[in-house]
Amino acid sequence: MSNGNEGRNLHFIEEIVEEDIRTGKHGGRILTRFPPEPNGYLHIGHAKSICLNFGLAKKYNGKCNLRFDDTNPVTEDVEYVDSIKEDIRWLGFDWEDREFFASDYFQQLFDWAILLIKKGVAYVDDCSADEVSASRGTPTRPGKESPFRNRSVEENLDLFIRMSKGEFPDGTKVLRAKIDMASPNMHMRDPVMYRIKHAHHHRTGDKWCIYPMYDYAHGQCDFIENITHSVCTLEFEVHKPLYDWFLDNIIDDPGVNKSRTRQYEFARLNLNYTVMSKRMLLKLVKENYVNGWDDPRMPTISGLRRRGYTSGSIRDFADRVGVAKRENIIDIGLLEFCIREDLNKKAQRLMAVINPLKVVIENYPEGVTEELEAVNNPEDESMGTRKVPFSRVIYIEKDDFMEEPPKKFFRLSPGSEVRLRYAYFMKCTDVVKNGAGEITELRCTYDPESKGGKSPDGRKVKSTIHWVSAEHAIEAEVRLYDRLFVKENPYEAEEGKTFVDNLNPDSLKTVTGYIEPFAKGSKPLDKFQFERIGYFCLDPDSSGNKLIFNRTVTLKDSWAKITSKEC
Ligand code: ATP
Ligand code: MG
C-alpha cells in the first residue's frame, strides 16, 4: 500500500522522528498511538490523525497502538468502539494485538492518585463542579484556593478511598491536584483528577464509581505504554506542563524520565462546509437531521465510505493536507478532488439517465435489440469493454434537448443532429407535447450507416450525448447528495440561531434514474461513473429488486463554477 507521500518533503514531525532515530533516542524505537474517545463515530479529522500516527509507524518501522480513552462512561459505548475499529481497518491500518483501553490502567491510575495524596500534592475538594470552575479565575486574574485545599494527608486518603467505595453521591467531591491557583496556565490551577460517577462502564462494569479526568489519564497512559512520540492537536499544547507535572511527581527515576514520551502538536484538520465536532455530529444524528452516523452527507469515515469514497482517496487527502503547525481551514474541494482523481482511474463507466426524456427513433425497426460495444474505462484499457443494448425507444437527459436553442447550444434541438454515445448519429424530427404544452417525447431518426458513432461520410456533429434503451434500462433510486451546510463556516450562526440553521435544505435530492443493465449484478459500494453526470456507488441498503445509487461527487466542481459566475 502506498501512503502516497513518496517524493514530498518531510513534515516537521517526520523531521523530529528522523532526528531521534539518528541520535538513538528511545534506542531507535518508534511507538505512536491513536487515542480516540469512544463517544462517537470517527470523522475525517480523525482520519488525518490516524494516517499521521499509523503512517509514522509504518514509515519508520515502528508500531502504532490503538488506545481507547474510555474515561467517561456516561457518553461512551461499545457501538462506538466497534465502529472505530472498523473505520481504522478500512483506512488500511493495523494495530495488530496492541488494542488498549485507558480503563485497563484504572487501577494503576488510582494507585498513583494515592501516591500523590501521600506526597501532599492532591486533595479531596467538597466544592461542586460549578464552584470549582467559578473559583478558577481568568487568565488575567488568579483563582481562589478552595477552603478544603489544606486537608491533612490522612483525611484526604480516607475521603478518596471512601469516594472510590461509593460512599458519596455524584458531584459531591472531587480529587484535585494541588499545584498553583495563580498559575498563568489555567490548566495548572488545581485541575480535577477524579470525579464521582455512579455509572456503568462498558468494560469495567460497576467496579468503579470514580473516574479519572482525561488530563490525569492521558499522559500516564502514554507513559505506561512507552509511547515515544505522542502526537496530538494544538489545543493540547497548553496541557503539556500538566502532563509533565503528573509524571514528574509519579516517577522518581532520572533514567526513565530521560526517555519519557514527548508530545508534539499539529493543527487539527478543519474543513469548510461541514462541522467536525463530535458533539455537533451527535446532535445531527440524535435529532434526525441526517439518517445516522453513516449518512453519506456526514463527514464521518463511515459516511464517506457509504458515499463512495475510497480509503486510498482519504489517505491521499490526508497527505496533501500536510501537517501544519498553525490552524487553517481546508477547502472541501480538495477532498472532492482526491476522490475524483482516484475514481477516474478505477470506476467502471456506465450510461444512466436521471432526468429522462423519451425518444422514439422512427426509422429503427420495432422489436430489434442491438448490442453495442462500450468502453469500461478509457483511463484503463485492461478494464475492457461491455455490450450496451440499443433499441427503438431510448431515454436521453431532458437537459440535452432544447426546443429553441440559443446560439451556443450544440446538443439536440429540432432538426439538429447529435451522436448517441457508442451508437449512432441521430436527428430530431418532431416534438410531442401534452395538453399543458410540456414536451413528453421526441421523434427522431438515426443514420444506420453511423454505427459505433462513426461518421459515414465525413460530416460532423458537434455533440455526443448519453442515452439508455427504455426497454432494457434498470429503474433505480438515485440519491443526489450535496454539501451538508450552505455556509462555508457553519459554526457561525446568526443571533438566536445555531449551526443547524446553516444546514443545506437541498443536501439530498432523490430522483429515479434509468441505468444500463450492466448495473444489475453490482454489489454494495461498487463504484461507477455515470457518464457526463458524476461518480456514484451502490448503497448497501439496495436489494435485488431495488437498487439505490449514492452520488459520491459530480464530475466537475460545480460549486466552483457557481461561485465564479457570481463573482
Ligand atoms: P471532537 O472535538 O470532535 O470531539 P476529539 O478530539 O475529542 O474530537 P478524540 O476521540 O479525543 O476526539 O480524538 C482522537 C484523536 O484524534 C486525538 O488525538 C485528536 O487529537 C485527533 N483529532 C480529533 N479531531 C481531529 C481533527 N479535526 N484533526 C486532526 N486530528 C484530530
Ligand atoms: Mg478528545
Image (cartoon, rainbow, N blue to C red):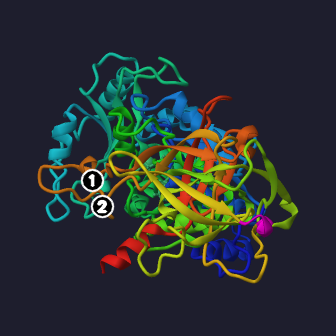
**Residue at 41% in and 77% down:** 406
Q: Nearer the viewer, residue 128 or 502?
A: 502
Q: Circle 2 sits on which residue?
A: 487
Q: Report whether 348 appears left or right of 405.
A: right
On whether ligand 1 comes within 8 Å of the CB at mark 2, the answer is no
**Residue at 37% in and 62% down:** 238
Q: What x and y, as percent, mark residue 505?
A: 31, 48
Q: Magenta span has 492?
A: no
Total residue callouts: 2
Look at the image and tell me in which quarter the N terminus lies. bottom right
Question: What are the residue bounds of the magenta stretch?
Answer: 447-452
**Residue at 53% in and 45% down:** 303
Q: What x and y, as percent, mark residue 58?
A: 74, 61
Chief SS of the magenta region: helix
Look at the image and tell me in which quarter the C terminus lies. bottom left
Q: Badge 2 local density, few (<14 within 10 Å), some, or many (20+)?
A: some
CB contact under 8 Å: marks 1 and 2? yes
Q: What x and y, as percent, mark residue 173?
A: 26, 29
Amino acid, disc 1: Asn
Query: Which numbered tag is attached to residue 474?
Result: none
On whether ligand 1 comes within 8 Å of the CB at mark 1, the answer is no
Amino acid, disc 2: Lys
**Residue at 54% in and 70% down:** 415
**Separation of marks 1 and 2 at Cα, in angstroms:** 6 Å
Q: Report whether 201 appears left or right of 210.
A: right
Q: Report whether 358 appears left or right of 40.
A: right
Task: Report whether residue 322 is seen.
Answer: no
Q: Circle 1 sits on which residue?
A: 502
Badge 1 or badge 2: first in the primary sequence: 2
Q: What x and y, as percent, mark residue 281?
A: 39, 44
Q: Nearer the viewer, residue 266 or 426?
A: 426
